[in-house]
Amino acid sequence: MRLLFITNLYPPYVVGGNEMLCEDVVCGLRGRGHEVTVLCGRGRLLAGRPDLRPELELDLDRKSESFLGGRVPTAWEAFRQHVFSPASFEATRRALRRLRPELVVVWNLYMASLSPAIAAEWNAAPTVVHLFDKWLYHGLRDLPGLLKPVVRWKRWLVGGAPLVLQPWLRLLLRPRRMVAVSRFIKRFYERAGFPGGAITVNHIGVPAGVFPQARLARREPGAPLRLLYVGSLWEGKGPQVAVRAVGRLLRAGTRARLDVCGSGTPHFLAFLRQTIADETSADHVVLHGQVDRSRLRELYGASDVLVFPSQWDEPFAAVPLEAMSCGLPVVATTAGGTPEAIEDGVNGLLVPPAEPDQLAAALQRLAADEDLRLRLAANSARVARERFSFDRYVDRLEAYYRACLRSPR
C-alpha cells in the first residue's frame, strides 16, 4: 500500500507516547513492504529526511509554548491552531497531488488545526481518522470547552463557534472511517453524535522486544518500595498526587522512593518541586527529566510498581502497557480507558483519581504483601503479551487499511 500519514508531532519531537507510537507503526508498516510518507509539523531536527514532509504550520521547535501552555496564543493564532490553517491546508493538498497515496491516515492533529483532515477528506483516496483523544470532537463540536478564554470579547467570540462556525466545519469534514484507541473513546464520540458504526476500536500494543520482562524477585527485607512515574509533567497526569501519596507512605512508616520521568513547563516543575519539599524530600523523590527508551527500560527493570495517577480522562496510554510488558504491577486510576488494560486485583490495582490517600493505601498493600505484588507482576507480563502485542496491533491496522481500500469511496 502507498500510505500518507498526517500528524502533528513526530519524533524526536515528543510530548507523550502518541508520537512514539506513530513512528513505531510507520516503521512497522515499512518493514512489511508498504510505502509510507509522513506529513507533520516543522522542526530543525526533521530536515533532510526523505521519508518526512515537515510542512504543516506548526513550529515543533517551540512545542513547549504550543503544547505545554508556555504562551497564550493570539486569537488569530488560536484559530489557525485549532480550526483552520490556510498554510497547512495548502501543504496537505500539495502532498496529496505529489504523492498520490492510496490511503490517507490522519493520526493526530491537535494544535495543527482541522485543515489537513479537511484537505484529505476531499481527496480522491479514502481517509482513516485515528481517535487517540478528543481533538476531533473539540474541533468539530466544542471549541469553548477546549479554549476556555478569560477575556470577555474572546469568550463571546468563542462561545458562538458551536452555533455559527462549527456547523460549517462539520459539512466540510465528515469522517466515515475512524479508529478509536479504546472503548471509552468510542463511547465518548458516540455520545457526542458521531456515528458509532463508523468507529472501530483497536487497542494499541507495545513491542515486547523493546520492553522485555525482567526477572521477578522478592524485595530485600526492609528495602524501600521502588515506585516509578512516567509521563508528561502536568496536573492532568497527576504526578503531584503520586508525590503526596509517597508523603503519606513515609509518614505511616513505609519506606518508599519515587522516580519521576518526564518533562513539563517551568511553572509546573516549580509547583512539583515545592510539593516534593512539602511532602517528602529530594532523597525520596527524584526528577529524571525526559529519558530515552534504553534508560526507561532500565528503570522499569529496577522498579517494583508503576504509579499511573492520571486525573484527566486518559484515553488509553502506552506507559502502563510498557510497564506490564516488563513485568511491573500497575497502580492506576479509573479515569478514562485505563481499566480496559488494568483489571483490579489481577494485573494491578485501581483507585479513584485525585485521591492521594487511596493511592497510598493501594501502594501500602503492595509494600506489605510480596506475594500479591509478584502475582500481579506475573499477570501483567502475561496480559501484555496475550492482549497488547505490538505485532498483532499492526496486523489489525494493516487488515483495516486494506479493507478501506476495498470499500466504496
Image: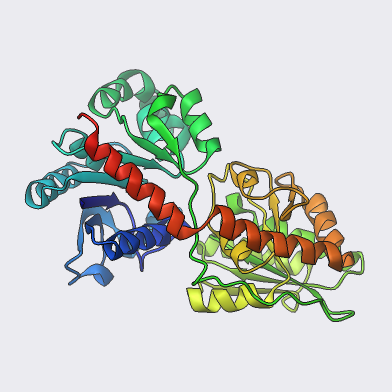
Q: Residue 161 occupies which quadrant of the picture? A: top left
Residue at figure coordinates x 20%, y 39% from the top left: 120
Residue 360 as seen in the image, left or right of residue 172: right
Residue 274 as seen in the image, left or right of residue 1: right
Q: Residue 228: x and y, percent?
A: 67, 68
Check the picture and name the quadrant holding the C terminus: top left
Q: Residue 331: x and y, percent?
A: 72, 56
Residue at figure coordinates x 28%, y 46% from the top left: 105
Closer to us: 138 or 18: 18
Q: Residue 47: x and y, percent?
A: 20, 70
Q: Residue 335 occupies which quadrant of the picture? A: top right
Residue at figure coordinates x 30%, y 31% from the top left: 175
Q: Residue 32: x and y, percent?
A: 29, 61
Residue 180 as seen in the image, left or right of residue 281: left
Residue 147 to residue 213: above or below: above
Residue 398 as seen in the image, left or right of residue 230: left
Q: Is residue 114 visible?
A: no
Q: Residue furthest top?
A: 163
